[in-house]
Amino acid sequence: MVKFDHMAMPVSDPKVSRDWYVKNFGFEVEFENAGVIAIRDDADFTIFLHKPQGSLAGVKCTLTLQVNDVEAKHRELAANGVKFDKPPDKFFWGYGVELFDPDGYLLNLWDEVSMREKGGG
């Protein structure tokens, strides 16, 4: 058996990223120590937020987060001042929304019902 357990994500300020993911998506802080903050989602997937030596130039990843209702989450986040790259729509990967975190990482948000009813990728 193979299970994706965690990933390391370089960020410019681990505390800013921690607060953003906790506030907007309900991640829980698993631990904080010497330059690393671990945040965990409801499925026990952990992201290690850390400040790399050097710059973030050239570092890229896309996070895909499943939510209960993508359109409701879009309205909630927009009301809280979160800026979206693209509103709910059909993309090559399916139906959802795209936005960027504080370090410019792309996030794709989706839900099972909208994906099935409005256009899976």
Image (cartoon, rainbow, N blue to C red):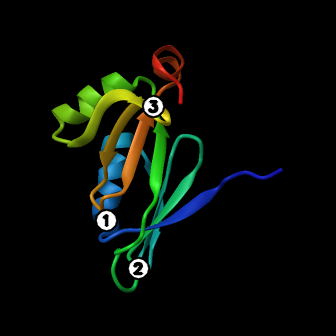
Task: Inspect the image, locate mark 1, and give the three-letter code of the amino acid beneath it.
Answer: Lys
Identify which residue is drawn at 42% across, 70% down: 59
Looking at the picture, does residue 24 appear above or below residue 12? above
Find residue 15 and name its label: 1
Rendered position, 69 above or below 9: above
Task: Tell me the CA gap for discs 1 and 3.
Answer: 26 Å
Answer few, some or many: residues within 10 Å of disc 1's Cα (few below 14, many 20 plus, some between 14 and 19): some
Disc 3 secondary structure class: strand
The disc at residue 69 is none
Nearer to us in this view, 30 or 93: 93
How crowded pointer 2 is (Cα within 10 Å; few <14, some 14-19, many 20+) is rated as: few
From the image, tell me which residue sits under label 2: 52
Nearer-the-camera pick, 48 or 109 = 109
What is the residue that sits farthest to the right in this orientation?
1
Image location of residue 7, percent across then percent down: 56, 62
Residue ID at (59%, 59%): 6
Label 1 vs 2, first from the N-terminus: 1
Q: Which mark is residue 110?
A: 3
Q: Position of residue 17 (x, y in %)?
A: 32, 60
- Residue 26 shows up from this direction: no
